Image (spheres, rainbow, N blue to C red):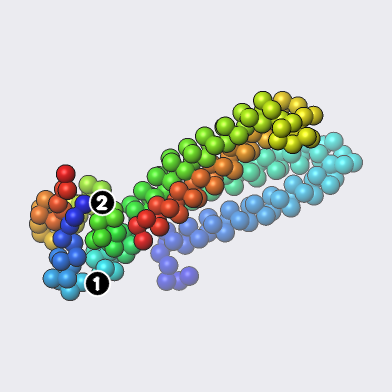
Amino acid sequence: MSGLSRANRRLIGVIFGTIAVAILGGIVGGVLMVLGRKSPLAAGLSELAVAGVMVVVMVMTLWLTARWWRAADEMVREAHKWAWYWGGSAGIAAGGVLFANVALFPASFNASLADATPSQIFIGGVGLCFLLQIAGYVLAWSGWWFARR
Amino acid sequence: MKNRLKVLRAERDWSQADLAQRLDVSRQTVNALETGKYDPSLPLAFRIARLFGQSIEAIFQDEA
Protein backbone atom coordinates (compact mmCIF):
# COMPACT_ATOMS: atom_id res chain seq x y z
CA MET A 1 0.00 0.00 0.00
CA SER A 2 2.95 2.36 0.63
CA GLY A 3 3.65 2.56 -3.11
CA LEU A 4 0.13 3.74 -3.95
CA SER A 5 -0.80 7.36 -4.52
CA ARG A 6 -3.02 9.14 -2.04
CA ALA A 7 -5.90 9.07 -4.54
CA ASN A 8 -5.61 5.32 -5.01
CA ARG A 9 -5.42 4.74 -1.27
CA ARG A 10 -8.61 6.77 -0.87
CA LEU A 11 -10.27 4.77 -3.65
CA ILE A 12 -9.37 1.46 -2.03
CA GLY A 13 -10.62 2.84 1.26
CA VAL A 14 -14.00 3.73 -0.26
CA ILE A 15 -14.33 0.28 -1.86
CA PHE A 16 -13.65 -1.52 1.40
CA GLY A 17 -15.79 1.02 3.25
CA THR A 18 -18.74 0.32 0.93
CA ILE A 19 -18.41 -3.41 1.49
CA ALA A 20 -18.08 -2.93 5.25
CA VAL A 21 -21.15 -0.65 5.43
CA ALA A 22 -23.18 -3.17 3.41
CA ILE A 23 -22.17 -6.10 5.62
CA LEU A 24 -22.55 -4.20 8.90
CA GLY A 25 -25.86 -2.69 7.85
CA GLY A 26 -27.12 -6.12 6.81
CA ILE A 27 -26.18 -7.60 10.19
CA VAL A 28 -27.76 -4.72 12.15
CA GLY A 29 -30.90 -4.83 10.01
CA GLY A 30 -31.13 -8.61 10.41
CA VAL A 31 -30.76 -8.48 14.19
CA LEU A 32 -33.40 -5.75 14.42
CA MET A 33 -35.76 -7.77 12.22
CA VAL A 34 -35.43 -10.74 14.58
CA LEU A 35 -36.03 -8.47 17.58
CA GLY A 36 -38.88 -6.87 15.67
CA ARG A 37 -40.96 -10.02 16.02
CA LYS A 38 -41.40 -9.09 19.69
CA SER A 39 -41.07 -5.31 19.54
CA PRO A 40 -42.82 -2.96 17.08
CA LEU A 41 -40.12 -0.35 17.77
CA ALA A 42 -37.39 -2.76 16.72
CA ALA A 43 -39.41 -3.68 13.64
CA GLY A 44 -39.62 -0.02 12.63
CA LEU A 45 -35.92 0.51 13.34
CA SER A 46 -34.98 -2.51 11.25
CA GLU A 47 -36.82 -1.04 8.26
CA LEU A 48 -35.02 2.27 8.78
CA ALA A 49 -31.68 0.51 9.15
CA VAL A 50 -32.08 -1.51 5.96
CA ALA A 51 -33.33 1.50 3.98
CA GLY A 52 -30.58 3.71 5.37
CA VAL A 53 -27.85 1.22 4.54
CA MET A 54 -29.21 0.83 1.01
CA VAL A 55 -29.09 4.60 0.48
CA VAL A 56 -25.53 4.88 1.82
CA VAL A 57 -24.27 1.93 -0.24
CA MET A 58 -26.00 3.33 -3.35
CA VAL A 59 -24.38 6.75 -2.93
CA MET A 60 -20.94 5.22 -2.32
CA THR A 61 -21.36 2.92 -5.32
CA LEU A 62 -22.38 5.83 -7.55
CA TRP A 63 -19.31 7.77 -6.43
CA LEU A 64 -17.08 4.81 -7.21
CA THR A 65 -18.77 4.37 -10.60
CA ALA A 66 -18.26 8.04 -11.46
CA ARG A 67 -14.62 7.76 -10.45
CA TRP A 68 -14.18 4.67 -12.60
CA TRP A 69 -15.90 6.34 -15.58
CA ARG A 70 -13.61 9.37 -15.43
CA ALA A 71 -10.55 7.11 -15.55
CA ALA A 72 -11.94 4.73 -18.19
CA ASP A 73 -10.44 4.47 -21.66
CA GLU A 74 -12.63 6.11 -24.35
CA MET A 75 -13.23 2.82 -26.14
CA VAL A 76 -14.45 1.28 -22.86
CA ARG A 77 -16.85 4.23 -22.43
CA GLU A 78 -18.06 3.91 -25.99
CA ALA A 79 -18.75 0.18 -25.51
CA HIS A 80 -20.81 0.80 -22.39
CA LYS A 81 -22.76 3.69 -23.93
CA TRP A 82 -23.54 1.69 -27.07
CA ALA A 83 -24.47 -1.43 -25.08
CA TRP A 84 -26.65 0.48 -22.63
CA TYR A 85 -28.57 2.23 -25.40
CA TRP A 86 -29.09 -0.66 -27.84
CA GLY A 87 -29.00 -3.59 -25.45
CA GLY A 88 -31.06 -1.84 -22.81
CA SER A 89 -33.59 -0.58 -25.37
CA ALA A 90 -33.98 -4.01 -26.99
CA GLY A 91 -34.30 -5.60 -23.56
CA ILE A 92 -37.01 -3.26 -22.35
CA ALA A 93 -38.82 -3.54 -25.70
CA ALA A 94 -38.86 -7.34 -25.39
CA GLY A 95 -39.86 -7.04 -21.75
CA GLY A 96 -42.65 -4.63 -22.60
CA VAL A 97 -44.10 -6.96 -25.23
CA LEU A 98 -43.90 -9.97 -22.90
CA PHE A 99 -45.40 -8.00 -20.02
CA ALA A 100 -48.28 -6.71 -22.14
CA ASN A 101 -49.14 -10.23 -23.31
CA VAL A 102 -48.89 -11.70 -19.81
CA ALA A 103 -51.05 -8.89 -18.46
CA LEU A 104 -53.71 -9.42 -21.16
CA PHE A 105 -53.67 -13.24 -21.24
CA PRO A 106 -52.14 -14.39 -17.93
CA ALA A 107 -53.66 -17.88 -17.90
CA SER A 108 -52.17 -18.64 -21.34
CA PHE A 109 -48.68 -18.37 -19.85
CA ASN A 110 -49.25 -20.07 -16.53
CA ALA A 111 -52.48 -21.25 -14.91
CA SER A 112 -51.39 -19.80 -11.55
CA LEU A 113 -51.18 -16.31 -13.09
CA ALA A 114 -54.94 -16.27 -13.58
CA ASP A 115 -55.28 -15.60 -9.83
CA ALA A 116 -52.62 -12.87 -9.76
CA THR A 117 -53.76 -9.37 -8.89
CA PRO A 118 -53.03 -6.48 -11.28
CA SER A 119 -50.39 -5.09 -8.93
CA GLN A 120 -48.66 -8.48 -8.71
CA ILE A 121 -48.58 -8.72 -12.51
CA PHE A 122 -47.29 -5.13 -12.69
CA ILE A 123 -44.49 -5.78 -10.19
CA GLY A 124 -43.58 -8.97 -12.03
CA GLY A 125 -43.52 -7.04 -15.29
CA VAL A 126 -41.19 -4.40 -13.84
CA GLY A 127 -38.83 -7.13 -12.67
CA LEU A 128 -38.99 -8.85 -16.04
CA CYS A 129 -38.21 -5.63 -17.93
CA PHE A 130 -35.27 -4.94 -15.58
CA LEU A 131 -33.83 -8.44 -16.08
CA LEU A 132 -34.23 -8.28 -19.85
CA GLN A 133 -32.58 -4.83 -19.92
CA ILE A 134 -29.57 -6.21 -18.07
CA ALA A 135 -29.44 -9.28 -20.33
CA GLY A 136 -29.68 -7.08 -23.44
CA TYR A 137 -26.95 -4.82 -22.11
CA VAL A 138 -24.59 -7.76 -21.42
CA LEU A 139 -25.24 -9.29 -24.85
CA ALA A 140 -24.76 -5.97 -26.65
CA TRP A 141 -21.58 -5.18 -24.70
CA SER A 142 -20.13 -8.63 -25.48
CA GLY A 143 -21.06 -8.30 -29.15
CA TRP A 144 -19.48 -4.83 -29.38
CA TRP A 145 -16.14 -6.11 -28.10
CA PHE A 146 -16.36 -9.33 -30.15
CA ALA A 147 -16.74 -7.27 -33.32
CA ARG A 148 -13.60 -5.29 -32.46
CA ARG A 149 -11.34 -8.02 -31.12
CA MET B 1 -11.64 4.61 -41.27
CA LYS B 2 -8.26 3.87 -42.84
CA ASN B 3 -5.21 5.29 -41.14
CA ARG B 4 -1.42 5.21 -41.07
CA LEU B 5 -1.06 4.59 -37.36
CA LYS B 6 0.69 1.26 -37.74
CA VAL B 7 3.20 2.71 -40.19
CA LEU B 8 3.89 5.76 -38.04
CA ARG B 9 4.29 3.54 -34.97
CA ALA B 10 6.67 1.19 -36.80
CA GLU B 11 8.80 4.13 -37.97
CA ARG B 12 9.46 4.97 -34.36
CA ASP B 13 9.91 1.35 -33.32
CA TRP B 14 7.12 1.60 -30.75
CA SER B 15 5.03 -1.31 -29.60
CA GLN B 16 1.25 -0.97 -29.35
CA ALA B 17 1.69 -0.75 -25.59
CA ASP B 18 4.22 2.10 -26.01
CA LEU B 19 1.82 4.03 -28.21
CA ALA B 20 -1.07 3.33 -25.86
CA GLN B 21 0.88 4.73 -22.93
CA ARG B 22 1.82 7.87 -24.87
CA LEU B 23 -1.81 8.43 -25.86
CA ASP B 24 -3.18 7.50 -22.43
CA VAL B 25 -5.45 4.79 -23.84
CA SER B 26 -5.47 0.99 -23.60
CA ARG B 27 -3.52 -1.29 -25.91
CA GLN B 28 -6.87 -2.69 -27.14
CA THR B 29 -7.83 0.81 -28.28
CA VAL B 30 -4.59 1.18 -30.23
CA ASN B 31 -5.14 -2.20 -31.86
CA ALA B 32 -8.73 -1.35 -32.76
CA LEU B 33 -7.62 2.03 -34.19
CA GLU B 34 -4.91 0.43 -36.34
CA THR B 35 -7.25 -2.23 -37.72
CA GLY B 36 -9.88 0.39 -38.50
CA LYS B 37 -12.43 -1.19 -36.19
CA TYR B 38 -12.70 1.90 -34.02
CA ASP B 39 -12.60 5.59 -34.92
CA PRO B 40 -11.04 7.94 -32.37
CA SER B 41 -12.88 10.78 -30.72
CA LEU B 42 -11.85 14.29 -31.77
CA PRO B 43 -9.68 14.91 -28.68
CA LEU B 44 -7.90 11.57 -29.23
CA ALA B 45 -7.43 12.33 -32.95
CA PHE B 46 -5.80 15.64 -32.03
CA ARG B 47 -3.56 13.90 -29.46
CA ILE B 48 -2.50 11.39 -32.12
CA ALA B 49 -1.77 14.17 -34.62
CA ARG B 50 0.26 16.12 -32.04
CA LEU B 51 2.21 13.02 -31.04
CA PHE B 52 3.26 12.25 -34.61
CA GLY B 53 3.65 15.89 -35.64
CA GLN B 54 1.23 15.56 -38.55
CA SER B 55 -2.25 16.77 -39.40
CA ILE B 56 -5.28 14.58 -38.67
CA GLU B 57 -6.01 14.33 -42.41
CA ALA B 58 -2.48 13.06 -43.05
CA ILE B 59 -3.02 10.21 -40.59
CA PHE B 60 -6.70 9.33 -41.12
CA GLN B 61 -8.41 8.90 -44.50
CA ASP B 62 -12.14 9.39 -44.75
CA GLU B 63 -13.51 6.58 -46.87
CA ALA B 64 -16.57 8.58 -47.96
Other-residue count near label 1 (Cα within 10 Å), few / some / many at <14 / 14–19 / ≥20: some
Mark 1 to mark 2 CA distance (whole Å): 20 Å
Rendered residue at 34%/53% (across/down): A75
For the question of whether residue B25 can be seen, the reply is: no
Residue B26, which numbered label? none
Front residue (pair B15, A94): A94
User: Which quadrant: the C terminus of chain A?
Assistant: bottom left
Per the image, label 1 sits on a secondary structure element best described as loop
Mark closer to the observer (1, 2): 2
- Residue that mark 1 sits on: B15
- Where is residue A25? Give x, y as percent: 69, 49
Q: Do callouts 1 and 2 point to residues on the same chain?
A: yes
Q: Which residue is mark 2?
A: B39
- The three-letter amino acid code for the residue at tag 2 is Asp
| x then y, percent, for residue A88 | 49, 41
**Chain where mark 2 sits:** B
| CB contact under 8 Å: marks 1 and 2 | no
Q: Amino acid at mark 1?
A: Ser
